[in-house]
Image (spheres, grey):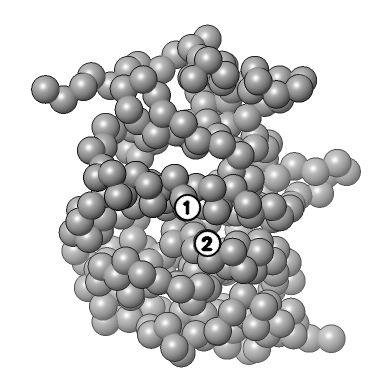
Amino acid sequence: MKPRVIHLEAGMQLDDRYRLERPLGNGSMAEVWAARDLGAEGQPAVAIKVVAELLAPSQQARLRFEREVRATSAVKHPNVVALVAHGEVEDGRPYLVMELVSGQSLADYLKDRDELLGASSAVAVGRQILDGLEAAHALGIIHRDLKPANIFLADRPGGKRQVKILDFGVALVLDLVESPEARLTRTGTILGSPRYMPFELARGATEVDPRSDLFGVGATLYHALTGHAPFTGKAIGEVMVKIMRHEIPPLAAERDDLPPALVAVVDRALAHLPEARYASAAEMREALVAALPA
């Protein structure tokens, strides 16, 4: 008999260490809670993401998950929301413990302001995303789900905001799913819309390299500059067809006020095949910074 999912509520403790305080969000993939780390000095606030459904991973998949979580925890960079620990709820669901930051996602920022980013703002955001990715890629960590909702604009003293990449650890949960078919299905349910997905992930590739993340950077900047994702459609099947055919409305046709060099950077990042994209985050960052007129 399948175990019953335990209902999470304020005051509950996970592993006798993390006390849940208030819910921050609830989606098809996970519940997110603000919590206190009772085992750390000062009992700092943390964010805890608990997988929404029970999984039945193989022992091999679980060991890989443990190994990759440890590797991801080693990514220490100001432009990455830190993954600090992980554990399991009593019903067996894995959870991830991350630093808690205040602010809003890039997706919410664009929605609230109802305006597009200008060239200089897009370059500033993109540069910080690429800085964080460079640190992660150096450790062999690939995000696999970059999009405006996973780019966080954290509040800083003086009213400034710092870009932080969210949810590196969430992609690791996919490794608890045994089959590529199930993993692809869960890409739609766990990680959300495929509207920012590169071709290789859409066709079910399980081994990807940094160039898949660079597509995500291009897709994020494309949305910030146009107001919509590269791939659109009312149904997932329609979106998947567009991904396979690489049907992206030209950025230059939607924004004729942008520097041609910036358009060229985004276009290259969104190339259909990985080999046509930038080879590294550092290479793309250099091209992005150089795209603005002196």
**Figure quadrant of residue 234:** bottom left
Q: Quadrant of the N terminus?
A: top left
Q: Measured from the top left, where is residue 99 in percent x and y?
A: 64, 37
Eyeballing the image, is 87 above or below 138?
above
**Figure quadrant of residue 77:** bottom right
Q: Residues within 10 Å of mark 2 (few under 14, many from 20)?
A: many
Outermost residue toward the left in this view: 1
Q: For mark 2, give the secondary structure.
A: loop
| Front residue (pair 157, 96) | 96
Q: Residue 68 carries which label?
A: 1
Q: Measured from the top left, where is residue 14 in percent x and y?
A: 48, 19
Q: How far apart are marks 1 and 2 (CA)?
A: 8 Å
Q: For mark 1, give the secondary structure.
A: helix
Q: What residue type is labelled 2?
A: Ile
Q: Measured from the top left, where is residue 216 in percent x and y?
A: 49, 67
Outermost residue toward the right in this view: 158
Residue at image location 41% in from the left, 29% down from the top: 88
Contact between labelled residues 2 and 1, with CB atoms less than 8 Å apart: yes
Q: In which quarter of the image is the C terminus?
A: bottom right
Residue at image location 19% in from the left, 64% down from the top: 237
Q: What residue type is labelled 1?
A: Glu
Looking at the image, residue 234 sits to the left or right of residue 268; the answer is: left
| Residue at the spot of label 2 | 141
Eyeballing the image, is 192 above or below 280?
above
Looking at the image, residue 15 sits to the left or right of residue 205; the answer is: right
| Front residue (pair 152, 185) | 185
N-terminal-most mark, 1 or 2: 1
Q: How crowded is mark 1: few (under 14 residues within 10 Å), some or many (20 or more)?
A: some
